[in-house]
Amino acid sequence: MTSAKEIDMKSMGSLRQASQKISGHLHKRLNGYLQTLTPLFAPRKILGEFMDSAFKERVSGADTNFIALEETFKTLARETFDIPAKLSTPVPNIRNQLEIHPWEYRYLIGGNAEHPVIITSPVRWILTYAGGTTLSDVMSHQAREELLEAEDLKQFIVRTLTLNKLIETSPSIQQMLEDLRFPLSTETAGATGDLPLSVIGSDLATFRPQDELIETVTQLSGKPVFEELIDLDAIETLPDPFRIKIMEMLG
């Protein structure tokens, strides 16, 4: 959960500059790691013959995976997205190409529903298979700011569920990213109901400044968007997971 912290406008300028610099560095490093690890994320390992592909060999466990995915898809289609719940096979091919998009959420300034702001994180990202529809698109659709075709929503759900299932069944992937200090977690967002989203974070803490400052910044920019700030004071106390593990082993 993001903390709140009061700062002044002058401090916000320097903090934003530092946050963007650190975020850019982390984004570049994470993209490099993911390019190297991409072969481990092949969606066919989960869907096998239930996904349209040039490879026709059966994949062990694909039938069980698809049944579970289909059940979750039907629930989400009916209860969250209001689209047809039928999932035909084989599902369209999912490219084994990974993308990361900033984690974002709607925030009501002062709890006022008339002043929603999209808050993004500089150190957390949604991990997805490449595709035309993103979480940001879906959030806009659910808020009726931008409508999406049912087929686009369907493919977004299937890609998301497939990736989440692969990560869930691949503890080695989770461990590698954690060792690289980019821990993976599964989270949900209000706009997507119980759809399990794969989120990559970092050890760096962030915060939102007071509502008055957020409101001032969004009014000056003319856009209802704001990015959390990295808590520079917390960097000095960052834990060293490797050291902690070794000390635990030694009792």
Image (cartoon, grey):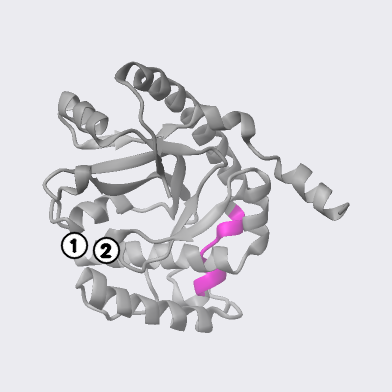
Look at the image and tell me in which quarter the C terminus lies. Answer: bottom right
**Which mark is drawn over residue 239?**
none
Q: Is residue 102 left or right of residue 81?
A: right
Main SS, magenta residues: helix
Badge 2 marks a residue whose secondary structure is: helix
Q: Nearer the viewer, residue 115 or 191?
A: 115
- Going by the numbered disc 2, the residue's amino acid type is Leu
- Going by the numbered disc 1, the residue's amino acid type is Glu
Residue 70, compared with residue 6, is above or below; it is below
Badge 1 marks a residue whose secondary structure is: loop
**Which mark is drawn over residue 153?**
2
Asked if residue 93 can be seen in this view, the reply is no
- Residue that numbered label 1 is attached to: 149
In magenta stretch: residue 187? no
Question: Residue 176 at x, y = what percent?
Answer: 67, 51
Residue at 51 percent across and 78 percent down: it is 65
Q: Nearer the viewer, residue 137 or 193?
A: 193
In 3D space, how far apart are the residues under numbered discs 2 and 1 (Cα atoms)? Answer: 7 Å
Span of residues in magenta: 39-47
Residue at 50 percent across and 35 percent down: it is 27
Question: Residue 39 at x, y = what percent?
Answer: 60, 54
Rendering quarter of residue 143: bottom left
In magenta stretch: residue 40? yes
Discs 2, 1 touching: Cβ within 8 Å? yes
